[in-house]
Image (cartoon, rainbow, N blue to C red):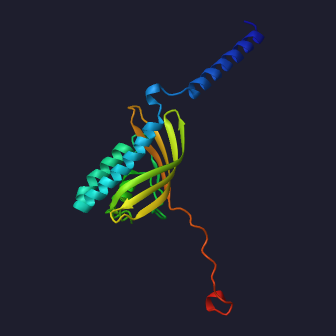
Amino acid sequence: MIPSTRRAFAVSVFALTTVLGTAAYAADPPSGQQITREEVKAAEKAWGDELVKISEAYDEGDIDRARPLAISMINRLYGYNLGPVLFKPTLTQEPQTFRLTKEGALAYFIGHDSNYPDTGFALKHWRMVVVDDVGLQINGAVANTMGKVTFWDRDKKPTTVDKTWTFKKDDNGVVRIILHHSSLPYTGPPEPCPCRPSDPVAQ
């Protein structure tokens, strides 16, 4: 094979390899691993239902009744079997704003952990959770949702948060949460002080 032909052959092989590699990378996951809108909505509902169960168990007993349910919720609904879960819940602060471990997530939900300051979000007497997505994206085995989640407590008082979730279907076909970000809605800047220039607070 002359050098020019050899170079042409090498270029052709490289081009073919690149095309095949790109195709393999861009290919859709097997049909059994593609996530559907219905599966995402079911996973969101399951999250709310499990939170209510933890609250009810705590109200009917104590932390010892609530803890097993919280552990089960985290094991079944979150994707720690896939790697770190990006977990930024609503009521956290530095230096533990972001949680990457099961222990950090469990502490947020039920407190009672000396390593974390949390009082337990799941212990706040919730009785109903309503998820209202404003957007849902699906990319093969992964889906993102963003919207409002409203929690109703036993006194029928609502609390609404802004929430973003990323779900991924694992190799066993189970839909898992791999990103959870939540925050309280921004209410705008404070009202200007209606005081006179002579008032001490205005000086």
Relative depth, front residue between 108 and 133: 133
Residue for point 38% across, 48% down: 47
Vertical position of residue 39 compared to residue 89: above or below? above
Residue for point 67% across, 20% down: 14
| Residue extending furthest toward the top | 1
Determine whether, in the image, residue 146 is placed left or right of residue 155.
Answer: right
Percent of width and height locating residue 170: 42, 35
Residue for point 44% across, 37% down: 38
Determine whether, in the image, residue 14 is placed left or right of residue 141.
Answer: right
On the question of residue 79 being in view, the answer is no
On the question of residue 34 being in view, the answer is yes
| Residue extending furthest toward the front | 156
| Residue extending furthest toward the left | 61
Instruction: Tell me how many marks there are.
Output: 0
Percent of width and height locating residue 92: 46, 62
Vertical position of residue 10 compared to residue 36: above or below? above
Q: Report the quarter where the N terminus lies.
A: top right
Percent of width and height locating residue 165: 49, 47
Q: Report the quarter where the C terminus lies.
A: bottom right
Res 99 → quadrant: bottom left
| Residue extending furthest toward the bottom | 198
Percent of width and height locating residue 70: 31, 52
Residue for point 53% across, 27% down: 28
Determine whether, in the image, residue 21 is placed left or right of residue 161.
Answer: right
